[in-house]
Amino acid sequence: MGDLENDIELLVCTRCHLDGDSAEVPQRPGAALFSRLVDAGMDSVRVTPVECLSNCSRGCTIALRGASRWTYIYGGLKPDTDIATIIEGTRKYRSTPDGVVPWRERPEHFRKNCIARIPPLAAPAPNQGKI
Ligand code: FES
């Protein structure tokens, strides 16, 4: 694990179905998404399974967070098609000091499927006007 300032955590809901579909399947799409992201081996990013991020009707769901960074929650992700998008978005998130990636530089899926963003616990938020 790196130093706290550079630590990025990608939370992945392993209980998610696609778009809230409740049909039981051998492996939930959220669990498949988590496995594929772990297999992708993102540098300096902790990939952590969680059981629910309260976005069940718009799964699959992830959250990006880090010390002194804004937290972003994204939904509507698919394990078969969105791994590269998540990796790209996570790298861009990590490349900023506060987690705020300029709007036009975000992956299209992130621009269209941001469920929420939460300010950092500490530190002033000089970017409050940005989304
Ligand atoms: S089951 Fe994934 S957000 Fe609730």
Image (cartoon, helix red, strand yellow):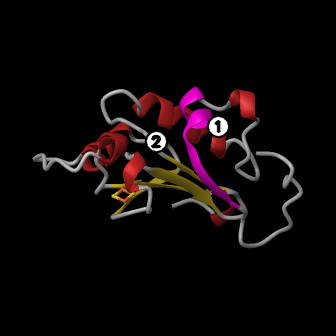
Q: Nearer the viewer, residue 5 or 128?
A: 128
- Disc with the residue nearer the chain's start (1 vs 2): 2
The residue lying at 62 percent from left, 34 percent from top is 111
Q: Quadrant of residue 110?
A: top right
Location of mark 2 (residue): 42
Q: SS class of the residue under badge 2?
A: loop
* Residue 57 % position (x, y): 38, 51
Q: Quadrant of residue 49?
A: bottom left
Three-letter amino acid code at the position of disc 2: Met
The residue lying at 46 percent from left, 42 percent from top is 42
Three-letter amino acid code at the position of disc 1: Lys
The residue lying at 45 percent from left, 29 percent from top is 84
Q: SS class of the residue under badge 1?
A: helix
| Residue labelled 2 has its Cβ within 8 Å of some atom of ligand 1 | no
Q: Nearer the viewer, residue 27 or 7?
A: 27
Location of mark 1 (residue): 92
Q: How many labels sit on residues? A: 2
In what quadrant of the picture does the C terminus appear? top right
Q: Which residues are magenta?
A: 108-118
**Other residues around mark 2 within 10 Å, as few (<14) / some (14–19) / many (≥20):** some
Q: Nearer the viewer, residue 6 or 34?
A: 34
